Image (cartoon, coloured by chain):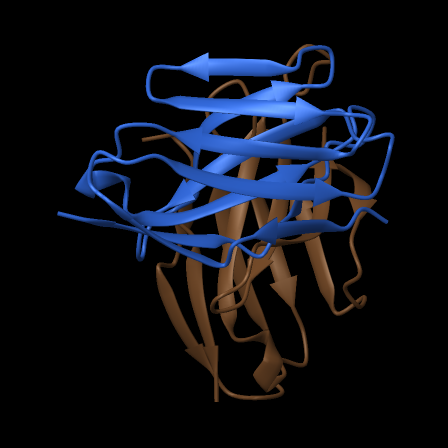
Amino acid sequence: GENVEQHPSTLSVQEGDSAVIKCTYSDSASNYFPWYKQELGKRPQLIIDIRSNVGEKKDQRIAVTLNKTAKHFSLHITETQPEDSAVYFCAASRSNDYKLSFGAGTTVTVRA
Amino acid sequence: ETGVTQSPTHLIKTRGQQVTLRCSSQSGHNTVSWYQQALGQGPQFIFQYYREEENGRGNFPPRFSGLQFPNYSSELNVNALELDDSALYLCASRLGTGMSYEQYFGPGTRLTVT
């Protein structure tokens, strides 16, 4: 089955700096890669996703890049703000079963 | 908010007991998946239902079972509870067409097994 690895496990950044989280996946048939943000005690919230037919997608301060050859994808958050503090999860799935395989998560702390 | 609701919010059970968790999908979503999230870990896929049929299962034993109803609400049943079943149980709904990949999570049910 799919195995998704996520790094780093924790990330502390100064407010205004950028944060980058990286994930690798093992199943070359995976073609959908969402990112979820989970605040303490709350549900995972879909913040951005990318499909395998594009290499990059951006939504305001958040961007995701995908390298299918290397089987890795990354989340970039620019101009970080205190409200960006949360646990971020990457995930991967195939379009024919939609089962999401998650990484272990990255705890992001934005220091004011 | 996603429109996906779950009940109850919290639940405490004793080892060996049985539990039923409930999920109401977002309007129009006919596919629901259930995930188990242990403390400090990412969610793990349990199974998925599409139009009342199970159509995918993760590495969970048969004592984890589910149902989906005609109104697309669903249940997760766990028999013979074990201490390791203590976790946050999340359901996620999706519009079951080939053009829609996004899954939207409910707030979860926190299950504690003592």
Chain appearing in brown on the rendered image: B
Foreground pick, B66 / A37: A37
Picture layout, residue B84 above or below residue B7: below
- Say which residue appears at 67% left-offset and 40% top-offset: A100
Picture quarter containing residue B31? top right
Q: Position of residue B58 (x, y in %)?
A: 78, 54
The total of numbered circles placed on residues is 0
Q: Colour of chain A?
A: blue
- Say which residue appears at 56% left-offset and 52% top-offset: A7
- Say which residue appears at 46% left-offset and 14% top-offset: A58
Q: Is residue B73 visible?
A: no
Q: Left or right: where does residue B30 sit relative to residue A30?
A: left
Picture layout, residue B104 above or below residue B39: above
Q: Position of residue B100 (x, y in %)?
A: 63, 15
Foreground pick, A13 / A29: A13
Q: Left or right: where does residue A3 sit relative to residue A47?
A: right
Foreground pick, A54 / A20: A20
Foreground pick, A101 / B58: A101
Q: Position of residue B5 (x, y in %)?
A: 40, 41
Picture quarter containing residue A78? top left
Q: Left or right: where does residue B13 sit relative to residue B101?
A: left
Q: Is residue A49 visible?
A: yes
Q: Position of residue B59 (x, y in %)?
A: 80, 61
Picture quarter containing residue A69? top right
Picture layout, residue B113 above or below residue A58: below
